[in-house]
Amino acid sequence: MNFSHNTFLEKIAQTTSSPFLLDIESAEGVYLYTPDGKKYMDLISGVGVSAIGHRHPYVINAIKEQLDKHLHVMVYGEFVQSSPNILAETLTSLLPDRLNCCYFVNSGTEANEGALKLAKRFTSRSEIIAFRGAYHGSTHGSLSVSGNEYKKFAFRPLLPDVKFLNFNKIEELDAITNKTAAVIVEPIQGDAGVRIPSIEYMEALREKCNANGTVLIFDEIQSGMGRTGKLFAFEHFNVVPDILTTAKALGGGLPIGAFIASREMMHSLTHDPMLGHITTFGGNPVCCAAANATLEVIENERLLDSVESKGQCFEELLQHPRIKEIRRIGLFFAIEFESADDVAKIVNYCLQHGIITFWFLSCPNSFRIAPPLNITNQEIEHACKVIVDAINTLGK
Ligand code: PMP
């Protein structure tokens, strides 16, 4: 075993000057374990991934079964393999008719890259409209449509022809015209600190896109897979996108993403040019097997049924005069404080007391709570007690 911090800090590329530096030996359910036997409750699901908990036995079993059959055998889109087939059948059966064709990729940002390319190819337009506060990933295309200027300035030039609107402002939707290829939006903005738009706004957005032949892309990479109490957040608004992107929790802990659209739209990737979007590993059979098992767990264990009541339980236990605002949908929370400094103190106190929380990149004065959906009420009570203790250390 090698838990050397020197190796980690010197031989593994760093992206921050102050990483958490927690040594992880194993993980199970809502807990992470260090080599010295300490346990930590993971209240953020590895940032949106472990929605059914870590190493769910059903997922582990499905992975093992697939390991005994085959791993990678061919690049995307050539050979017929069972686990991607099952995943495509299941996902499309759970989605509205219009979303009946899946393209599997390896990550969230790649799902958005594929979605943006598909929208441009399908409409023969180039303009993309995105939103302030949005986070869509770290590769060039996804970064171009993300809102945080601080993350972008060093990497310009990025994609041209991208316009930004304020989220949830109906009066700005006139910016969508017949020149707009796509609007890309998180139906619940995650990294901006759990921003929930009105139903009216989402309906108006859909109508504007319809009127202009603009492709509406919903990035459900963080908001999907049960996080909000519905399998996908768009179900809260009764507004269906033209392309849905998903990743993170889809693989139950293995890396997989997808962009999902109509067969007709997706077909445009087969010609002019042929192989309009390609990937070596997309649809990896082991990742697909894990995703199939994850969807089965959500269904068989009826995990969606208790998301709202568990969310309420957190909210009730987290009343405190120092909290400025709680934004919540399902088990997706931003807890807002006066300053980023207060949040850092709370996150650190929680870490020292066995609870993992985290701030938001574009909203550092809030911290996130997005636990595995199968967290128990007892675990919620314990977590909230520690968090309230942490808030109390801030003083009056
Ligand atoms: N979209 C959203 C809404 C996300 O939250 C994230 C990741 N935080 C991404 C896209 C990018 O996903 P990935 O890190 O897998 O590329």
Image (spheres, rainbow, N blue to C red):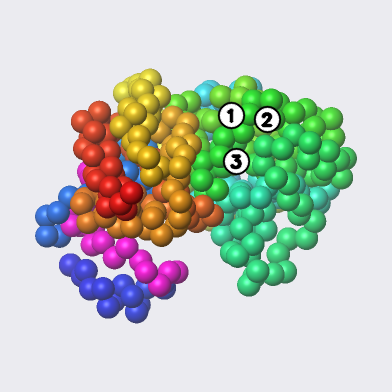
**Residue type for callout 2:** Met
Mark nearer the N terminus (3 vs 2): 3
Cβ atoms at labels 2 and 1 below 8 Å apart: yes
Mark nearer the N terminus (3 vs 1): 3
**Residue type for callout 1:** Phe
Q: Which residue lies at the image location 23% right of the left edge and 73% below the top edge? A: 4
Range drawn in magenta: 15-34
Position of residue 50 relative to residue 340, above or below, is above
Position of residue 140 relative to residue 256, above or below, is below
Q: Nearer the viewer, residue 348 or 15?
A: 348
Judging by the rendered image, the residue that carries numbered circle 3 is 186
Q: Secondary structure at mark 2?
A: helix
Q: Secondary structure at mark 1?
A: helix
Q: Nearer the viewer, residue 132 or 108?
A: 132
Residue 234 % position (x, y): 58, 29
Q: Which residue lies at the image location 24% right of the left edge and 33% below the top edge? A: 381
Label 3 and label 1: CA atoms lie apart by 9 Å
Residue 17 % position (x, y): 40, 72
In the image, is 67 to the left or to the right of 140? left
